[in-house]
Image: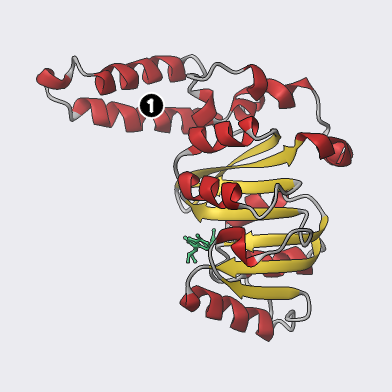
């Protein structure tokens, strides 16, 4: 069997995964990303974890059909709890909520060298948690897949940043989050993306403005004095400065 072509979203995530001896793909589902990590030489060993039996079984059969069982270990269970200390350099979590990812990172069993995270929501809280925990966010990507925009980022533990220096040209921009105001919208949007302004940047910001404007438009006059109304209005104002 030939490996399936990954979606644009997963390809973009794949592009920021550092090469390492062992990486976990948590919430692996179909197992496509786990297989590509081996097939394209990003890792020598992969742990593909999923909390649900159905998805894990489909990953198992995909991996077996590709003949990759010897280097991909499929494990059933919650987050990184299926792994042991010392087994991994890094982990990837894609297509789940940011709050769940934060819980998965928090629960350990250890502070890995790196995490590649593609949260569907809770971006600000997840980025803030990683930075508070001593990680530097060194790469962010923005991708459009089937008409939807996604962001993902690579967070590397500060004490091992030098290992990743060559591949990611770490400079002061990568420490931008350390100085970022706690209430800045860039925690949610992506401060490195704001520096880099990739090709989809304007579309992304306009979309974020549109989402907030829709909520405001649905609020009656009586709600215009609420904190929510004020926060959304302030966010729109801040977002417009980044176009
Ligand atoms: C929407 S799918 C994303 C699949 C794949 N990572 C992707 O991005 O295409 C989310 C997967 O995460 C799994 N999942 C949810 N919570 C989990 C947890 N706490 N630990 C491990 N897997 C989890 C689900 O069973 C599901 O297979």
**Place of residue 107 in the rendered image (x, y in percent of width and height, measured from the top left):** 58, 51
Report the number of numbered marks: 1
Label 1 environment density (alpha carbons within 10 Å; few <14, some 14–19, many ≥20): some
* Rendered view: 112 above or below 224: below
Residue at x 64% of width, y 51% of height:
13
Residue at x 25% of width, y 31% of height:
215
> How are the colours assigned in the image?
secondary structure
Q: Quadrant of residue 165?
A: top right
State whether residue 43 appears in this view. Answer: yes
Residue at x 62% of width, y 67% of height:
82
**Place of residue 114 in the rendered image (x, y in percent of width and height, measured from the top left):** 73, 46
**Place of residue 235 in the rendered image (x, y in percent of width and height, measured from the top left):** 39, 20
Task: Give the quarter of the figure containing the N terminus.
Answer: bottom right
**Place of residue 115 in the rendered image (x, y in percent of width and height, measured from the top left):** 67, 47
Q: Is residue 165 left or right of residue 119?
A: right
* Rendered view: 66 above or below 200: below
Q: Name the residue tied to disc 1.
A: 209
Q: Quadrant of residue 37?
A: bottom right
Secondary structure found at label 1:
helix
* Rendered view: 208 above or below 73: above
* Observer-nearest of 214 and 222: 222
State whether residue 16 appears in this view. Answer: no
Q: Is residue 28 left or right of residue 69?
A: left
Find out if the beta carbon at label 1 lies less than 8 Å from the nearest ligand 1 atom: no
Residue at x 45% of width, y 39% of height:
122
């Amino acid at each position: 069997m030939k490996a399936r072509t990954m979606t644009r979203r997963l390809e973009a995530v794949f592009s920021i995964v550092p090469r390492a001896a062992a990486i976990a793909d948590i919430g692996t589902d179909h197992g496509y990303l786990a297989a590509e990590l081996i097939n394209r030489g990003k890792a020598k060993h992969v742990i593909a974890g999923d909390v649900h039996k159905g998805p894990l079984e489909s990953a198992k059969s995909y991996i077996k059909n590709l003949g990759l069982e010897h280097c991909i270990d499929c494990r059933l269970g919650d987050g990184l709890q299926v792994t042991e200390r010392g087994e991994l350099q890094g982990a990837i979590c894609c297509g789940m909520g940011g709050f769940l990812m934060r819980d998965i990172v928090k629960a350990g069993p250890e502070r890995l060298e790196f995490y590649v995270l593609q949260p569907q929501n809770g971006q600000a809280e997840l980025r803030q948690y990683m930075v508070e925990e001593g990680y530097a966010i060194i790469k962010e990507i923005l991708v459009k897949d089937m008409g939807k925009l996604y962001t993902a980022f690579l967070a590397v533990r500060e004490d091992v940043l030098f290992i990743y220096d060559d591949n990611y040209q770490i400079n002061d921009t990568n420490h931008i989050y350390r100085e970022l105001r706690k209430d800045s919208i860039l925690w949610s949007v992506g401060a490195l993306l704001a520096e880099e302004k990739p090709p989809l940047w304007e579309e992304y910001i306009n979309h974020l403005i549109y989402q907030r404007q829709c909520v405001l438009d649905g609020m009656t006059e009586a709600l215009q004095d609420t904190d929510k109304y004020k926060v959304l209005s302030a966010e729109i104002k801040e977002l417009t400065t980044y176009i």
